[in-house]
Image (cartoon, rainbow, N blue to C red):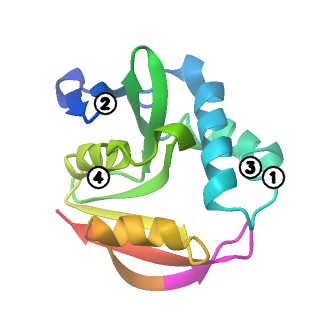
């Protein structure tokens, strides 16, 4: 995982307590993959095996080592994470944003996106069109569709979303 400036991390209060946004540690990759797998099962029921097998292996070996990943944590537990790739001061892509299903709806995703917005002027992400809840979340946060593509791994149609500032 990419080195980070500790001054850019912090603590925020949510409805149910104090949440820290902190850099991911390489030793917690399996815990983050478990969050992805559990949340994706809910968000992507049309993708059998999401977060397992070859896709989990790719996350372990190609995504997490190169991404800048922030973790939302409370009481020593990782509740969710966001991974940025291809980051410059001008733009970055949100490769993954997943929150444990039991912690969704607490504002953690919004906090992680706010952290990401402080890292680049323009943020982009890809969302499966069949994930209506995910599309609504991103649109609520000010992201607009700029295009569509076919995901090369799943053959699913994704919306390409972008937000300035």
State which mark lies toward you, 1 or 2: 2
Tell me if I can see residue 85 in this picture: yes
Quick one: label 4, few (<14), some, or many (20+) residues within 10 Å? few
State which mark lies toward you, 4 or 2: 2
- Disc 1 and disc 4 in contact, CB within 8 angstroms: no
Q: What is the tally of numbered marks visible in this picture?
A: 4
Quick one: label 3, few (<14), some, or many (20+) residues within 10 Å? some
Q: Is residue 62 magenta?
A: no
Q: Residue visible at 53% across and 38% down?
A: 102
Magenta span dominant secondary structure: loop
Q: Is residue 155 magenta?
A: yes
Disc number placed over residue 16 in the picture, else none: 2
Residues under labels 4 and 2: Cα distance?
Answer: 34 Å
Residues under labels 4 and 3: Cα distance?
Answer: 26 Å
Q: Earlier in the sequence, mark 3 or mark 1?
A: 1
The x, y position of residue 53, in whole percent, is 83, 44
The residue tagged 3 is 55
Residues under labels 1 and 4: Cα distance?
Answer: 32 Å
Region rendered in magenta: 148-157
Q: Which image quadrant: the C terminus?
A: bottom left
Q: Residue visible at 46% across and 38% down?
A: 103
The residue tagged 1 is 49
Q: Earlier in the sequence, mark 4 or mark 3?
A: 3
Residues under labels 3 and 2: Cα distance?
Answer: 33 Å
State which mark lies toward you, 3 or 1: 1
Disc number placed over residue 88 in the picture, else none: 4
Q: Helix or strand or loop: what does disc 3 sit on?
A: helix
The x, y position of residue 160, in whole percent, is 45, 76
Q: Earlier in the sequence, mark 4 or mark 2?
A: 2
Q: Earlier in the sequence, mark 1 or mark 2?
A: 2
């Amino acid at each position: 995982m990419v080195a980070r400036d500790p001054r850019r991390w912090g603590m925020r209060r949510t409805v149910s307590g104090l949440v820290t946004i902190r850099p991911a540690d390489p030793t917690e990759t399996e815990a983050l993959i478990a969050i992805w797998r559990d949340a994706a099962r809910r968000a992507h029921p049309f993708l059998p095996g999401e977060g397992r097998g070859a896709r989990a292996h790719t996350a372990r070996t190609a995504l997490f080592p190169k991404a800048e990943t922030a973790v939302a944590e409370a009481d020593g537990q990782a509740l969710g994470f966001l991974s940025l790739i291809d980051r410059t001061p001008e733009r970055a892509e949100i490769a993954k944003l997943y929150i444990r299903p039991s912690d969704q709806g607490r504002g953690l995703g919004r906090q992680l996106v706010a952290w990401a917005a402080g890292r680049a002027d323009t943020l982009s992400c890809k969302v499966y069109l069949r994930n209506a809840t995910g599309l609504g979340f991103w649109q609520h946060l000010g992201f607009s569709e700029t295009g569509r593509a076919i995901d090369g791994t799943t053959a699913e149609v994704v919306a390409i979303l972008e937000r300035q500032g």
